[in-house]
Image: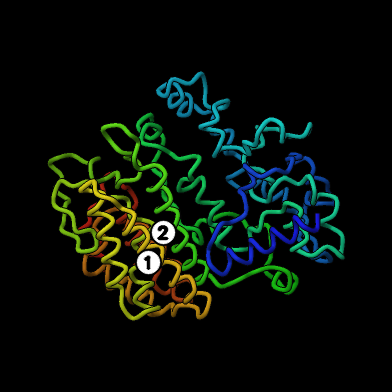
Amino acid sequence: MKIRRLLLLLSMGFFAATSGASPELPQYADEMHLGVASCASSTCHGSIKPRQSTKVLQNEYVVWSRLDAHQGAYQTLLSEESMWIAKNLGLPNAHEADVCLDCHADNVAADKRDSRFQISDGIGCEACHGGAEHYLMSHTDPSQSHEDNIADGLYPTDQVETRASLCFSCHVGHEDKIASHEIMGAGHPRLGFELDTFTILQPAHFVVDGDYEKAKWHADSVTVWALGQIEAGRQSLRLIETHLDTGNLFPELSLFDCHSCHHPMSDLKWQSQERVGLPPGAVRLNDAGLVMLIPLSKVLTGSSDEFENAARELQLTTYQNRNKSQSIAKLRHLMDKLNRRVLEDRPDDRQLLSNILAMAKDGDFSDYVAAEQAVMAIDLLFSYGDQRQKNSDWLDQMYEAVADEDVFDPFVFQSVF
């Protein structure tokens, strides 16, 4: 156990410093999953009311079971829409298909399921926090540190990089699972995600107090947003490397901007975009994971030219079916530099907001996925600067402009700014 712990802590330290390999995701790790019932006792995490005398609230199970959307993820597979998707994919049903369960449940291998484990619990405790086989009995021991618990299989969700990897594995895509064009063609909705915004939208089952700050990594929303954007960019590159080339006539089309194709031909939305650099009629990569790194680069390095050039080159090499490895390597290098800069000094929220607003005013977010990311960033930055209430009417207009992706008008969105 000591050797295992040492190796894991070393790997985590390496990851935090250089963004190398992260810990294995809970779904694929070695630990047995005991089921949410193992956490539900009123003396553990099933207290009806939050407790003040302990380091944790102890009502985490109740919050999850009553308020958290993840609890109902499996039930979604029993809906009429899911049944129709499964039928279109040639599957008997959705609630027994691994391709669906991989993101709608804690779909660990059969030999990793304890007798109390139930797949119908959906995205339960261990889907995010790791199989409890080794830490269940020891994690309440006062002498047990957070690092000890991680070494025993607890997944480090406090670390933004590893948390992002976990969330992105379902909400963006992963090397081993992806909402492919086939799945979306069968009826699955498009995926859209931003780490900090979606975290805030879920009911918190923890409090960042003195005990939390002493034991775990923590940062403000701007830092989490910035690091989350960098991780989104990295994950976009991984998906391109592992899924883009299918060996068939068409590549994996889910990695491209859906709205490049999915709009009436009479709806002339195309605009020349310097950051993309593609001609009319070209199907561009979905750059939702890259676009917010442009204003971040401006704030952290004084210029976004190098990053924009590398992102444009990735679009061009993909469109022209040329080797993409050089542009991917360049983007990775630039993201690593941004990551180090964020950890050294939090990006200035006012400059970030100013840059994003300027890009919006110039029409740089004429595609829906970029506008979607911009809206979430602007809202977060207004909230961080205590300016949200004062600008609520204007923010409502901004949200209205992106309320429906099927009728999104880039000119209307630009006019809001």
Tag 1 near tag 2, CB within 8 Å: yes
In which image quadrant can residue 399 be found?
A: bottom left
Q: Circle 1 sits in a helix, a strand or a loop, which is it?
A: helix
Position of the N terminus, as image quadrant, is bottom right
x 69%, y 58%: residue: 8
Q: Is residue 65 visible?
A: no
Q: Is residue 182 visible?
A: yes
Q: Is residue 51 left or right of residue 256?
A: right
Position of the C terminus, as image quadrant, is bottom left
- For the image, the number of numbered tags is 2
Q: Nearer the viewer, residue 368 or 149?
A: 149
Q: Is residue 402 left or right of residue 3?
A: left
Sequence order check, earlier mark of 1 and 2: 2
Residue 278 position in % (x across, y down): 18, 54
Q: Amino acid at mark 1?
A: Leu
Residue 252 position in % (x across, y down): 34, 39
Residue 46 position in % (x across, y down): 78, 49
Relative to 306, residue 175 above or below:
above
Q: Is residue 343 left or right of residue 183?
A: right
Q: Amino acid at mark 2?
A: Gly
Q: Nearer the viewer, residue 155 or 201?
A: 155
Residue of label 2: 233
Residue of label 1: 293
x 33%, y 68%: residue: 294
Q: Circle 2 sits in a helix, a strand or a loop, which is it?
A: helix
